[in-house]
Amino acid sequence: MKWLILRRTSQLMVLGFFLLGPLGDIWWISGSLSGSLILKVLPLTDPLVFLQTIFAGHPPADMALAGALIVISFYLLVGGRVFCSWVCPVNIIADCAAWLRDKIGIRGVLFFSNSSRYWLLAMVCGLALAFQAAVWEMINPVTIFSRGIIFGLTGAVVVGATLFFFDLLLGKRGWCQICPTGAFYSLLGHLSPLKVIASGREQCDQCLACYKVCPEPQVLHEPLQEKEASPVILSGQCTNCGRCIDVCPQSVFTFGSRFSK
């Protein structure tokens, strides 16, 4: 489970660096996932927060603009929705709820279409335009949960529990299916050079282990089942989590370049 261990290490390290300030007065990183400063010099800005600011009609500060460009460039390079699987703290909650659902045999009640997250992304931008403010950030569960963990707010427990039981009882990884942050990063993922490749698909024995663990199983169909198609998972909805690489008994998958033949 190499990639699972690396993902969890990455998620916990990100939170750990943010917690160094409030808990240990070591301010290597100040702020939160919405906006932060590394070593009081390098700005990082959540691109979706920045986009809402633009739609709200507020001219962005130079630091916010620079921070957004840095974050966009990074995720454009490494795979867009890598944020969802390697950074976002809600991913841990979603994985725990999905594991428990499978253990006790709960079947989904709510199923969201692949376009749902994009409709919610459009709604987020529309709210900012209508109210001249980043309205979504007031109710965004990812923002509330991450800030609550970093700054010790009890709201994080409430939001975390709500997301857990939403995923457990109503729909497997239900929030991730509609999250507008994931929708934004998936747009970057369409252009990213780092991809998962079904380079050994000739050895695939149709055990479906990859489909069972993949948070976005629809992205596996074309590279696995359509032999005339590229073996590269080109969909921006792939989170580059490495789950398929971990579980495949035939070692079908690997990380590589979108330009691989």
Image (cartoon, rainbow, N blue to C red):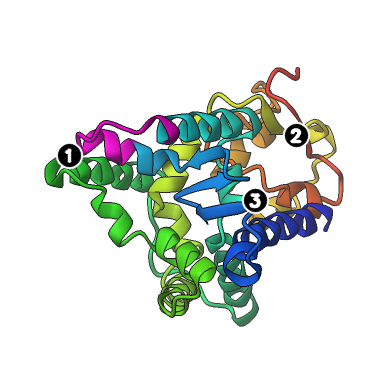
Under circle 2, the secondary element is: loop
Percent from the top left, x then y, of residue 195? 68, 32
N-terminal of the pair, mark 2 or mark 3, is 3
Quadrant, the N terminus: bottom right
Quadrant, the C terminus: top right
Residue matched to label 3: 86
Q: Is residue 59 left or right of residue 252?
A: left
Q: Which residue is mark 2?
A: 198
What type is the residue that disc 2 sits on? Ala
Asked if the residues shown at circle 2 and circle 3 are in contact, with their CB atoms under 8 angstroms apart, the answer is no
Give 63 or 194, whichever is nearer the viewer: 63
What's under tag 3, amino acid-wise? Trp
Label 2 – label 1 distance at C-alpha: 42 Å
Q: Tell me the number on the disc at residue 219.
A: none
Q: Which residues are magenta?
A: 51-63
Left or right: residue 200 versus residue 89 is: right
Q: Give me the residue at 58% from left, 78% from top.
A: 105
